[in-house]
Image (cartoon, helix red, strand yellow):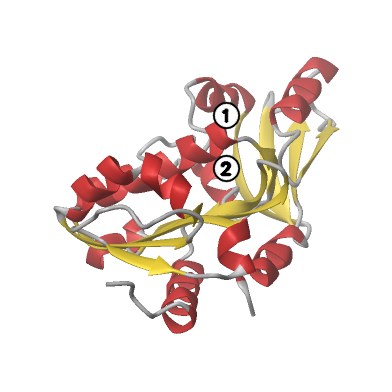
Amino acid sequence: MSLTELIAGVEDHQKTLTIFNAGPTAAEDLRERFADRNVHVQTEQTESGRPGEFITLSEDEEVIAAASLNSFTDSLDEGRQYITRDNSPYASILDHLDETMFTSWSIQRMTAASREIEDRAWRVGQGTLHAGFQTLSTLQGELDLYERLGETDVDVHAYAVPDVEPPEYSTFSLHLERSDEIADSWFVVFDGGGDPTQKCALLAEEREPREFYGFWTYDESTVDWIIDYLEETYGYLEQ
């Protein structure tokens, strides 16, 4: 299985957000917020109208998370839209939306999501981080950040297609690959630094010019699979 096939597998599993006892405005608001996600938004009413406005997330007709509607929308308003695993009691639905496809993400949104994983690796201060930049010219714009991250105890691996001369670097490992998969893929994967709860990954492919389709995940087995695949497929290091 390739990175593209992994993304396609996630794409096949759509989740459903069901809004209970709320007016049409709430549904339209959430449909707009999740327009770039592989999530179906629907509304229902309980017979009694109780317990008020709430929301559930389900997959294959099984409810996997629930919250009050106000608490959930407050979480969105506070900006927890990318990597969300935190101590908030209302982040659970957003957390369960990992491994849900996003569509047509811009460079800006991809960068914001990548920063959250890079920051997590920085805070943990150890472990291994793998990052795919598509091209060396893209890596050049991130060189200072990755040199500083490589100065920590984090083992940093960068992957890119050589479209320019390699930059000077000293603190991370560079994998130069003339591969369509590397040219089309944007990924940032952190192994948690020995703490399974810190494992996370962002994986996407460029299907349209500068528009990315993919997912993020905290699932340990998925993160491990991506890392194993990268190491087995692109293990040669450019010295």
In the structure shown, which secondary structural element does the residue marked by tag 1 occupy?
helix
Q: Nearer the viewer, residue 174 or 109?
A: 174
For residue 45, which quarter of the picture? Answer: top right
Q: Nearer the viewer, residue 198 or 235?
A: 235
Q: Position of residue 176 (x, y in %)?
A: 43, 68
Q: What type is the residue that disc 1 sits on?
A: Phe
Q: Is residue 21 visible?
A: no
Q: Quadrant of the C terminus?
A: bottom left
Q: Which residue is mark 2?
A: 93
For residue 185, which quarter of the picture? Answer: bottom right
Residue 187 against residue 236 in the figure, above or below: above
Q: CA distance from mark 1 to mark 2?
A: 8 Å
Q: Nearer the viewer, residue 210 or 163?
A: 163
For residue 224, which quarter of the picture? Answer: bottom left
Badges 1 and 2: C-beta atoms under 8 Å apart?
yes
Q: Which residue is mark 1?
A: 72
Is 64 on the left-hand or right-hand side of 34?
left
Q: Residue at x 80, y 28 (%)?
A: 48
Q: Position of residue 84 (x, y in %)?
A: 45, 40
Q: Position of residue 55 (x, y in %)?
A: 68, 35
